[in-house]
Amino acid sequence: MAMLMVLLGIVMVLSAASVQDLRIHGNAWYHQRRQLIWVVLGLAGLVTTSRLDYRRLKPMAVWLLVGSVVLLLTVFIPGIGIRANGSSRWIGVGAATFQPSELAKLAVILYGSVLLSSRPVNDLRGTILPLAAVLGGVGALVYAEPDLGTTMILGAIAASLLFFAGLRLAIVGATAALGVSMLGAMTMTAGYRRERLLSMFDPWSDPLNTGWQAIQAGVAMSNGGLWGMGLGASRAKWGFLPFAETDFIFAIVAEELGFAAALGVILVYLVIGLVGLNTALHAPDRLGQLLAAGITTWIMIQAYVNIGAVLGVLPITGVPLPFVSYGGSSMVLTLTAYGVLLNVARQTP
């Protein structure tokens, strides 16, 4: 299922980006060639982690977390951090760029899984407070970029780890309610986030600014109908829909391949989620259970947030569609993490 999404992404990135690539770079294959490189690197990471016993990752937990925090701090250093579209989310050397928040997701999953598998989940000082401190520190750095979407995903990952570790559902629910309240408060603290949230309810109130992407995504999907306009025949990619190859690639899928293909994409993610959670429930030990749950939650929540934003039922957050959207950091690290999930599944009785 994951490889099916990767192959779909390779085709759709070419289709979604080719027009603007030809106009800007003089090469219609610019994004697709780079995507192929990321896929190869991601598959190398997947093969490595799928063959490496996940228990051997335990000593790496703290170092991976420290490394991700250092990299998250680095994005704020002028000359190293790259600022684009009002956010400082990348570091770069020459033509190469990297998004540390993607590494932070894997680091939080690995650290939280190791911590919760080695100590009682109800141990306030030994378990809850350290995990809350890590989540708060990493989340604050990601939020400061600013990247509220990834901050929300990190919170969902931590909640899933606590739930599968055995924390009482009432406590998890209360924590989730507190997190949603804080998320709402953080959304209202910045003007552009507040405008995005309000435009979700009525994009036509500002159709040329905050509502532009939502409206154009809706037009693209409605043009696709049941069977689509045909591969490569999208109109939205001709400059009407910004970030068509990244944040809004699902709209291009629906426009060119139709409602049937869009529904198929959703069903594939559902299958990945169900099999991932089944792997977590039948994992050979607590560490494997938590790793499988955290990685599955990461993929499912991110897919839900991305598709929800394209459909206009969630605010636009700028998170990519796993395995499909263009993006090196996301592709490489998602596939590498998926290899860990496969390794747990291979060892499941």
Image: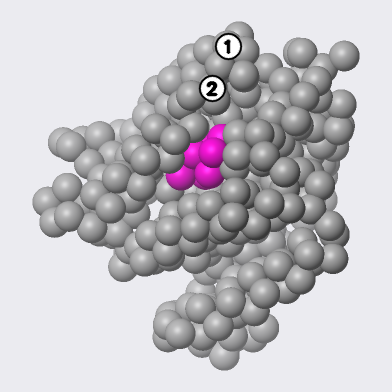
What secondary structure is the stretch in magenta mostly built from? Answer: helix
> Which residue is identified by label 1?
52
Question: What kind of residue is marked 2?
Answer: Leu
Q: Residue at x 53, y 12 (%)?
A: 48
Q: CA distance from mark 1 to mark 2?
A: 8 Å
Tell me the tag on residue 250: none
Q: Residue at x 76, y 71 (%)?
A: 174
Task: Count every numbered label the image shows and give the total.
Answer: 2
Q: Is residue 109 magenta?
A: yes
Given the current orientation, which residue lies at the most extreme bottom position? 205
Disc 1 to disc 2: CB gap under 8 Å: yes
State whether residue 247 appears in this view.
no
Q: Position of residue 246 (x, y in %)?
A: 49, 48
Question: What kind of residue is marked 1?
Answer: Leu
Badge 1 marks a residue whose secondary structure is loop
Please give left or right for residue 271 compared with residue 232 in the image: right
Please give left or right for residue 60 compared with residue 34 in the image: right
Q: Is residue 299 above or below residue 39?
A: below
Q: Earlier in the sequence, mark 1 or mark 2?
A: 1
Q: Residue at x 78, y 65 (%)?
A: 171
Badge 2 marks a residue whose secondary structure is helix
